[in-house]
Image (spheres, rainbow, N blue to C red):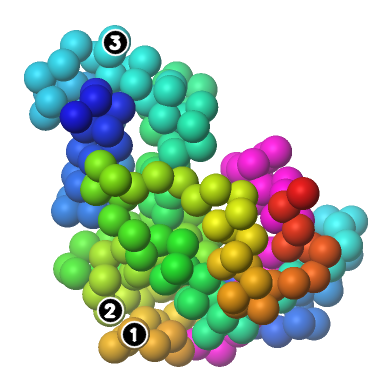
Amino acid sequence: MSLDLQVRAHVYDATMRGGAIPRIADVAAALGVPAEEIRESLGRLATGRVLVLQGDGEILMANPFSAVPTPFIVAAGGRLYYGNCIWDALGIAAMLRCDAVVDTSCGDCGTAARVEVRGGAVRGDGIMHFAIRARDWWKDIVFN
Amino acid sequence: MLFFRSEEHVDRWCASWHLGRGAVLSLETGWKLAEAWYGPDRRDPQWRRRTLEETEALFAELGFTSEFWSLR
């Protein structure tokens, strides 16, 4: 398996099992590969739109997961995760294939809201809004 | 993609950001999209990003046929 496939598999596996996206040093230690090679691999994965990186080269997004706190907190399988958006928050439940509770808030007024996924069905009092046209999603993936 | 209490709140948010209204999905439809998009295991070496044509087919399956969802 190529290094990029190993890195992708490890990043997702560590995130799904542990709740937090691993840092470059963690991936390097886990795979027994020099950190600089991991950094280069992450760069290639980001170019391929598999990951989004922070300015220092660490991972910002391994969609649907966020490495930094967001207003989309997902409790699932006894762990807490951050989703990048409401779509990704539901995506975490889909990726983990388990029930989940999403604690978020209204993007307009900030009122707290809870969305639940139970038994493969979603429940909640609200809607989702996609502001950016689909063809433009990757022009500013952080805003999107 | 944000969560809103209602369409009225979507319109207020769009106005405050000087953005036109985008696409509003029910949670049920959003969940179907999330399942289709994120269900495949990204740890699997065989996983790859969808092609443009595959994404278009998924959008069509979910009823996303307006210009907003066009990828071209």
Q: Is A61 above or below relative to A126? A: above
Horizontal side, residue A21 vs residue B50: left or right: left
- Name the residue carrying label 3: A36
Q: Foreground residue, A82 or B46?
A: B46
Q: Secondary structure at mark 2?
A: loop
Position of residue A8 measured from the top left corner of the image (x, y, whole percent): 29, 37
Of pointers 3 and 2, the one earlier in the residue sequence: 3
Q: CA distance from mark 3 to mark 1?
A: 41 Å
Q: Is residue A43 above or below residue A76?
A: above
Secondary structure of the residue carrying numbered label 1: loop
Q: Chain of mark 2?
A: A
Q: Earlier in the sequence, mark 1 or mark 2?
A: 2
The reply to whether discs 3 and 1 touch (Cβ–Cβ < 8 Å) is no
The reply, left or right, for residue A106 in relation to residue B9 is left
Taking the image as drawn, is residue A60 in sight? no
Q: CA distance from mark 3 to mark 2?
A: 38 Å
Q: CA distance from mark 1 to mark 2?
A: 7 Å
Magenta residues (range): A124-144
Specify the amino acid type for callout 3. Answer: Glu
Give, as a three-letter code, the residue at label 2.
Answer: Asp
Tell me the residue at 60%/42% (across/down): A142
Q: Which residue is mark 1?
A: A120
Relative to A28, is A140 above or below?
below
Q: Position of residue A22 (x, y in %)?
A: 26, 36
Which mark is drawn over residue A99? 2
